[in-house]
Amino acid sequence: MPDNPVIRIGHLKITDHLILGISADKIKTGVETLKHCTLEPVLMHGWNQVADALSDGSLEGAFILAPTAMDLFKSGVPIKLILFTHRSGSILVKNKAAGIKRMQDFKGKIVLIPYQLSVHHMLFHKLLAEMGLKPGTTKDPHADVFLEVMAPSMMPEAIQYDEDGEIGGFIVAEPIGTLAIKQGYGEQVCLSKDLWPGHPCCVFVARDEIIERYPQAIQEITNSFVQSGFFVDKNPGKAAVVGAEFLGQGVDIISSVLSDPSDRITTSELFPKINDLIVIQNYMIHDMNIMTTAIDMNVFVDPRFAKAAGAK
């Protein structure tokens, strides 16, 4: 790669990845200049695509689900976790056609999750367990609620066309849930912050060879993301305008995600806290049995860039 590399960062059209859009906009409008690299956001359409591109090196970095990043690291993909990209920011939505009045009514229904190795899956699993319900697949004779993985962007349409109410709902990053509610097909059950206040979810990871060869580039990108995070929390109205374009949604949708309530998603506390990641890992190993062995978080997480950037 050249001395001034292009850093391609994969992302989805979700507010969890809004700080990438804010940074890209600052650079495009000349508010900010990167001296050591060119930042190139790369839109992906699902988590498999992000994971594959990160694994084969066609991306230098990505905004990706924390548990998925852990699994890639465990399987030998040379990446490090640099920064959290947000806290909270997801929603559990019920399908209006499913006639759900209380959590017990999810029994016998399909619930859509964005990925197996996701904090969404963990939070919903925990919620069901507290209600005495067992999540599983349609092939599991002991399951009470059937979980199916679906790309976030497809979820609103899935309940729109489910006239029989077989799909109970979905848990997903915003603005997908708010979109389904505004379209009239979904209703809010709860926000993810109500299940685990200030939980991490998506993280910024970069490949080892990029970190080692271009540490100044990773530092200035991290600096930008941290400042973008502060900007979103302090200026939700302005951030909603930029976010609407970046995420392909109406300003009203993004505005409500960023400000109703104000802590629905937070982007000003992005320092990668290892203890939060350990909570996720332990639950997925011991309660969900979808992770087998623990990774060394002190090797996986590289906090020096976040620290130098003044992340909180």
Image: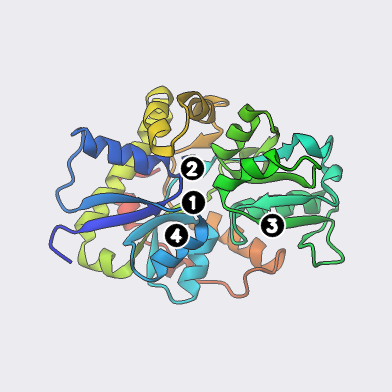
Q: Name the secondary structure under disc 1.
A: strand
What separation in Å lies between label 4 and label 3 (alpha carbons)? 19 Å
Question: Quadrant of the image for the N terminus?
Answer: bottom left
| Labels 1 and 2: the sequence-earlier one | 2
Would you name the residue on which mark 4 appears? 50
CB under 8 Å between callouts 1 and 2? yes
Question: Quadrant of the image for the C terminus?
Answer: top left
Whole-percent x, y for residue 255 in the image: 48, 26
What separation in Å lies between label 1 and label 2 (alpha carbons)? 10 Å
Vertical relation: 141 (above or below) 44? below
| Labels 4 and 3: the sequence-earlier one | 4
Amino acid type indicated by mark 1? Cys
What separation in Å lies between label 3 and label 2 (alpha carbons)? 20 Å
Amino acid type indicated by mark 4? Val
Would you name the residue on which mark 1 appears? 202
Q: Residues within 10 Å of mark 2 (few under 14, many from 20)?
A: many
Amino acid type indicated by mark 3? Glu
Specify whether residue 41 is in view: yes
| Labels 3 and 2: the sequence-earlier one | 2
Would you name the residue on which mark 3 appears? 148
